[in-house]
Image (cartoon, helix red, strand yellow):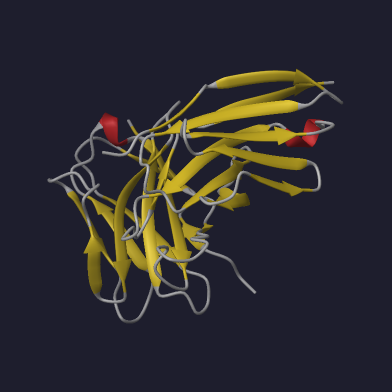
Amino acid sequence: NAGVMQNPRHLVRRRGQEARLRCSPMKGHSHVYWYRQLPEEGLKFMVYLQKENIIDESGMPKERFSAEFPKEGPSILRIQQVVRGDSAAYFCASSPRRTSGNTGELFFGEGSRLTVL
Amino acid sequence: GEDVEQSLFLSVREGDSSVINCTYTDSSSTYLYWYKQEPGAGLQLLTYIFSNMDMKQDQRLTVLLNKKDKHLSLRIADTQTGDSAIYFCAETQGTGANNLFFGTGTRLTVIP
């Protein structure tokens, strides 16, 4: 009965490299959300995806960041040409349905901590 | 736009009550939530309250909602060292929301 699985837990990259963060939602969940937590700050919404569709990417930086949730396999958050300001904890959450109209509980993974040197 | 605010730090002695406060701006919020984040872990839902309720109690946790002032609080009775964590207030944004908006989190430190 696995929960939301994220990997890697810790990732170190040098400036200019690419970072790929993976998230496998809970079994039966088709909605995935990515949040970013900068040091000493709260979680900020980045993107909401369903299988093969981006529903809301209003929180995604316009450049270098992309996300996908293919029909098969985990959701991937990709950051190209990383900069020091990308250092943060990236949390993935999943839900069985849209959060509106119900209790809206999201199930969170343990996060991927990206450090850019 | 939405804005959820919390104080950053709170320290209490073991056995005392903790009260963590939160204010929000979206008057159309339907549900409000408290999440707990322990060190090195993801967030876990602690409790939630529907916007037409004033209070909800769940064992040592009491949630109070003042909709007029857009103020939410979480009271933890008989606080234990295991309650040390970051507590996030969150709200759904309107009736068409598809995600939650979180406050900055309050770091609760319980002093033995």
Above or below for A92 versus A11:
below
Image point 47% across, 35% down: which residue? Answer: B68
Q: Is residue A52 left or right of residue B32?
A: left
Quadrant containing the N terminus of chain B in the rendered view: top left
Image point 52% across, 64% down: which residue? Answer: A4
Q: Is residue B58 left or right of residue A90?
A: right
Where residue A77 appears, as percent x and y from the top left, is 30, 56
Above or below for A2 versus B105:
below
Q: Nearer the viewer, residue B77 or A30?
A: B77
Where residue B40 appears, as percent x and y from the top left, is 59, 41
Please tell me how many numbered marks the rendered image carries.
Answer: 0
Q: Is residue A72 left or right of residue A27?
A: left
Where residue B19 appears, as percent x and y from the top left, is 68, 27
Quadrant containing the C terminus of chain B in the rendered view: top right
Image point 58% across, 44% down: which residue? Answer: B34
Where residue B99 appears, as percent x and y from the top left, is 37, 55
Q: Nearer the viewer, residue B51 or B13?
A: B51
As drawn, which residue projects farthest toward the left?
A: A63
